[in-house]
Image (spheres, rainbow, N blue to C red):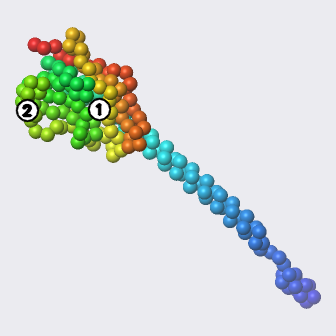
């Protein structure tokens, strides 16, 4: 019996549990670990978005270059009116121009009745050379200028690049991209 009383008194005086200091230190450590995890996850998300934007920019640049090659590669006559526009006779027999898009994110193509440098009239609204869907929400195309060498039938596009909404260049072809056009018949 005496042993039982001794055990009961010992249990009542027992100091098992956590002190306030131990609880505060544990809370501080959990807070730091949580902050590091949230920061790490946010960094991973940012890297993912940047990687996706770069991949989309490469696709947009490649698609634009292919569209330029297909469009200008079949031209039978090319005129360079300014550095910002290239005028050509398309394989459909219409005069057309390619220039920076006013209502699209890439280049736009405009067809004309007659030579636009000699008073030809625009037919309809300009069309995007590459569908806007190729350029994701925050991407757009930029370039330096068009050039044309009549002697060797070469059209050049300088400083072709895709930028994001912040103006960062994500994909580019800084050298002149040259397209050999079809010789006049």
| Foreground pick, 117 / 20 | 117
Q: Kindly state the secondary structure of the residue where label 2 is placed.
A: strand
Looking at the rendered image, the quarter that the N terminus falls into is: bottom right
Q: Are marks 2 and 1 in contact (CB under 8 Å)?
A: no
Instruction: Return the mark for residue 132.
Output: none
Residue 50 in the image: above or below residue 19: above
Residue 82 coordinates in the image, percent (x, y): 22, 25
Residue 83 coordinates in the image, percent (x, y): 26, 25
Residue at position x 10%, y 39% in the image:
124
The residue that mark 2 highlights is 121
* Residue mark closest to the camera, 2 vs 1: 2
| Foreground pick, 10 / 87 | 87
The residue that mark 1 highlights is 63
Q: Is residue 70 among what the camera can see?
A: no
Looking at the rendered image, the quarter that the C terminus falls into is: top left
Q: Left or right: 3 with respect to 94? A: right
Q: Quadrant of residue 32?
A: bottom right
Residue at position x 13%, y 14% in the image:
184
| Foreground pick, 70 / 167 | 167
Q: Kindly state the secondary structure of the residue where label 1 is placed.
A: helix
Residue 114 coordinates in the image, percent (x, y): 6, 26
Q: Left or right: 69 with respect to 41? A: left
């Amino acid at each position: 019996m005496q042993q039982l009383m001794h055990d009961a008194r010992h249990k009542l005086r027992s100091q098992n549990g956590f002190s306030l200091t131990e609880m505060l230190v544990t809370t501080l450590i959990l807070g730091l670990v949580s902050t590091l995890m949230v920061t790490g996850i946010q960094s991973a998300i940012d890297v993912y978005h940047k990687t996706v934007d770069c991949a989309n920019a490469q696709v947009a640049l490649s698609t634009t270059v292919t569209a330029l090659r297909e469009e200008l590669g079949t031209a039978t006559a090319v005129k360079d009116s300014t550095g910002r526009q290239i005028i050509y006779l398309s394989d459909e027999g219409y005069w057309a121009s390619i220039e920076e898009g006013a209502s699209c994110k890439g280049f736009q193509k405009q067809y004309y009745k007659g030579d636009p440098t000699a008073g030809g009239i625009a037919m309809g609204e300009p069309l995007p050379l590459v569908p806007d869907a190729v350029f994701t929400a925050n991407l757009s195309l930029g370039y330096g200028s068009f050039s044309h060498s009549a002697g060797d039938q070469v059209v050049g596009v300088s400083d072709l690049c895709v930028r994001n909404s912040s103006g960062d260049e994500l994909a580019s072809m800084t050298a002149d991209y040259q397209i050999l056009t079809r010789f006049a018949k």
